[in-house]
Image (spheres, rainbow, N blue to C red):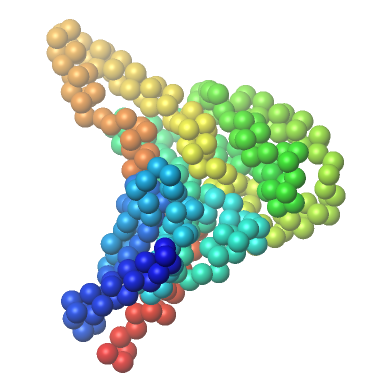
Amino acid sequence: MSRLKDKINSDFFKAKNNLNKSKGELEQIAVFVESYDDILFWKDIFDKCSLQTKIHLASRTSLERGKSAVLKHNVGKLLILCVDSDYDYLLQDHTNDSKLINSNPYIFQTYTYSIENFKCYAESLHGVVIKATLQDEPHLFDYNNFLKEYSLIIYDLFIHLLHHIKEQSNSFKPQEFLDLIKLNKVDIKSQGKKELLELDSLVKNKIATFNGFSDTQITQFKNDLYQLGVKPENTYLFIRGHNLYEDVVCIFLNPIVSYLKRKHFTEIDNQKKSDNEAIQMKQQYQNSVTEIKTLLFHNTNYYDCFLMKKIFSDVKKYKENNFSFENS
């Protein structure tokens, strides 16, 4: 019954669009996504590709939500699906869902684990901090290098995690991986060197306990993933996005923002204003800035990420294959 309903919906959209569109105008496409957070992300992409879309949540009930709800819909020219890749992109034939997502031209995916990974794109973080503090101290923290070093440290452990999932081994589970790679604090003055060294030690100790897979197997698996874009220096783009957001990036962004705000307050105090005037200036500053988590959530400065370019390539191909007006 569900599939019949989807077919009827798709036919309805098509009939309605044929009545309303003028010659050369793109038809409106129904898009189903996992959550409210995904709507603006995908809407922005489709708008940039000049596609007229109406984006819907796949389900509004608590019983059936997220990716599974999206993938229950039939797809076609006027009804497409958008999902987080999770590990389905990297483990392309692992499940029926992963096979479907990676082969169906009417299903678009993030290629990163989720949209949170894009929002934490290293090259965008300096700009996010400037917006959050209205202060710019470019040499305070090297965001790119930190996430590169972090990625280099966790890369081999991440490879082992994916290989365990691929081989359906329960001896190393995703939650254990996430617990190992989280950061509790980052000393921004030292660029987090101590914390990265401690993480490196934890990771190496854990890897030393693995004995189920040969070096040849792991090397071949690394090569396979490299072809999909996974490199030692960009591992952070492929780990679970929510954990990257909460347990890594916000761990160093919060002290950076606090430092810059305190520094600006000190500058106000040093201007030898009266107490009332200083208090007023500080309040005006506080009213002018936005919480870092809010700005990170709305961050869109990630369009030069190579995985974002893959999404645009998919959308362009879909558009060319389904909306050609040469014979109109």
Q: Nearer the viewer, residue 116 or 58?
A: 58
In this picture, is 158 found above or below 102? above
The x, y position of residue 116, in whole percent, is 45, 44
> Residue at the location (44% across, 24% down)?
255
Identify the image quadrant of the C terminus.
Answer: bottom left
Residue furthest out toward the bottom: 327
> Residue at the location (32% across, 56% down)?
56
> Residue at the location (52% across, 31% down)?
247
The x, y position of residue 155, in whole percent, is 67, 44
The x, y position of residue 66, in whole percent, is 45, 49
Q: Nearer the viewer, residue 277 or 295?
A: 295
In the rendered structure, the answer to whether residue 94 lies left or right of residue 63 reads right
> Residue at the location (65% across, 36% down)?
177
* Residue 286 seen in this snapshot: yes
Q: Quadrant of residue 78?
A: bottom left
Q: Quadrant of residue 175?
A: top right
Residue furthest out toward the top: 275
Q: Nearer the viewer, residue 273 or 184?
A: 184
* Residue 118 seen in this snapshot: no
Q: Quadrant of residue 226?
A: bottom right
